[in-house]
Amino acid sequence: MNIRCFKKSDSGNIRVDSPNKADLISVSKDDVSKEQMQAVAKHFDFRGDIRESASGESWNVYKVPFSEYAPTFEFDLSSIK
């Protein structure tokens, strides 16, 4: 099984050489099932949801769940006229 490792940058995801340096890991669906990808993610302590890649050919998982790094803020709907 080949694990592709990526780090987020301003210009997109760049390839890195190990899961320890990565924000995202990706494995071909030809190599693993979704359940097997969950085991891979757990082994490397990647806690994001297992998601299908845009191409549909790989399983992707982020180091942290989206809710932990997505910016949130309070918004008062009464300010909209």
Image (cartoon, rainbow, N blue to C red):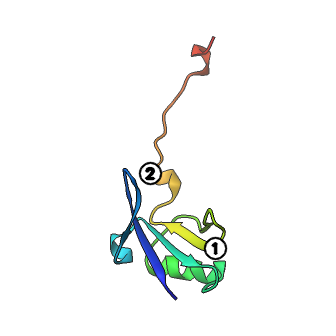
Looking at the picture, how far across and down is residue 70, in whole percent? Answer: 48, 47
Does residue 29 appear left or right of residue 13 in this picture?
Answer: right
| Residue at the bottom extreme of this rendering | 1
Residue at 38% x, 52% y: name it.
11
Question: N-terminal of the two: label 1 or label 2?
Answer: 1
Q: Quadrant of residue 31?
A: bottom right
Nearest the eye: 40 or 7 = 7
Nearest the eye: 55 or 76 = 55
Q: Dot 2: what SS?
A: helix
Up-down: is 56 above or below 44? above
Q: Amino acid at mark 2?
A: Tyr
Looking at the picture, how far across and down is residue 59, in whole percent? Answer: 59, 73
Which residue is tagged 2?
69
Q: Quadrant of the C terminus?
A: top right
The label on residue 30 is: none
Camera-near label (1 vs 2) is 1
Which residue is tagged 1?
57
Nearest the eye: 79 or 22 = 22
Callout 1: few (<14), some (14-19), or many (20+) C-alpha neighbours within 10 Å?
Answer: few
Looking at the picture, how far across and down is residue 16, in whole percent? Answer: 35, 72
Tell me whether the residue at label 1 lies in contact with that at label 2, contact meaning CB atoms closer than 8 angstroms.
Answer: no
| Residue at the top extreme of this rendering | 81
Up-down: is 67 above or below 54? above
Does residue 43 appear left or right of residue 16 in this picture?
Answer: right
Residue at 34% x, 77% y: name it.
17
Q: Amino acid at mark 1?
A: Glu
Residue at 61% x, 21% y: name it.
77
Looking at the picture, how far across and down is residue 49, in whole percent? Answer: 58, 65
Does residue 66 appear left or right of residue 56 in this picture?
Answer: left
Q: Quadrant of residue 37?
A: bottom right
